Amino acid sequence: MLRLFAIAAIVCNVATLGLVVAAVRRARGRVSMGRGAVNARAVVGVAALLATGATLGSLYLSEIAHLEPCRWCWFQRIAMYPLALVLIIGLLFRDRTVYRYGLPMCVAGAAMSTWHYLLQHFPDLEGATSCSITSPCAVRYAWEFGFVSIPYMAGSVFVLVGALLILARRRS
């Protein structure tokens, strides 16, 4: 299952790269997209689906696969779980300003995921002051393809959802 989650994270990275390339090409005038070409509501729907999938994936890892989340995993969950809920509610109520609530959660979550990923590479960055003995932050429960860990997976979703919310903002 971790391999499947890792593949999903890489797909998120490719999609984010595609959004960035399209935005740069559009800014340079090479690609013309009319206002109706991308429906903001559909974009928020995809973002809600991604955040909900990440939420369910993290619950799977802790409740079914019995991987105990560390302190930084919990911080990322604190950003992801409400993000999924906010996006679903924004979608249901057709809130064109849902990006105002979602983007700060994406930025915070991506920052925490980046820090946690760095801790996995450089455990001495934080020492043993914030992580427990039973669930150390530097442990790599997953290390797929030589670089994809659980914080990497979460960070990939945060960044893609953030990019989608920026796109939805421009389209609304």
Image (tube, rainbow, N blue to C red):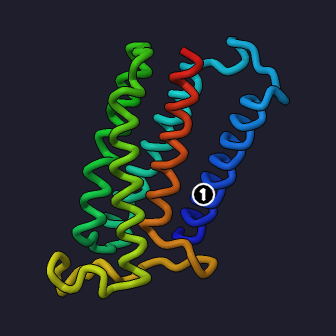
Looking at the image, which is closer to me, 56 or 44? Answer: 44
Q: Quadrant of the C terminus?
A: top right
Disc 1 crowd rating (10 Å Cα; few below 14, some 14-19, many 20+) is some
Amino acid type of the residue tagged 1 in the rendering: Ala
Res 112 quadrant in image? bottom left
Q: Residue at x 85, y 30 (%)?
A: 30
Give the labeled residue for mark 1.
Answer: 8
Q: What x and y, as percent, mark residue 44?
A: 51, 27
Q: Is residue 26 above or below residue 93?
A: below
Looking at the image, which is closer to me, 59 or 13? Answer: 13
Q: Is residue 70 left or right of residue 113?
A: left
Residue pushed farthest front? 28
Q: Is residue 42 left or right of residue 119?
A: right
Q: Residue at x 63, y 78 (%)?
A: 145
Q: What x and y, as percent, mark residue 12?
A: 60, 52
Q: Residue at x 69, y 34 (%)?
A: 23
Q: Is residue 26 left or right of residue 118?
A: right
Res 86 quadrant in image? top left
Q: Residue at x 54, y 19 (%)?
A: 41
Q: What x and y, as percent, mark residue 16?
A: 63, 47
Classify mark 1: helix, strand or loop. Answer: helix
Looking at the image, which is closer to me, 150 or 63? Answer: 150
Q: Is residue 70 above or below residue 78?
A: below
Q: Is residue 163 above or below residue 87?
A: below
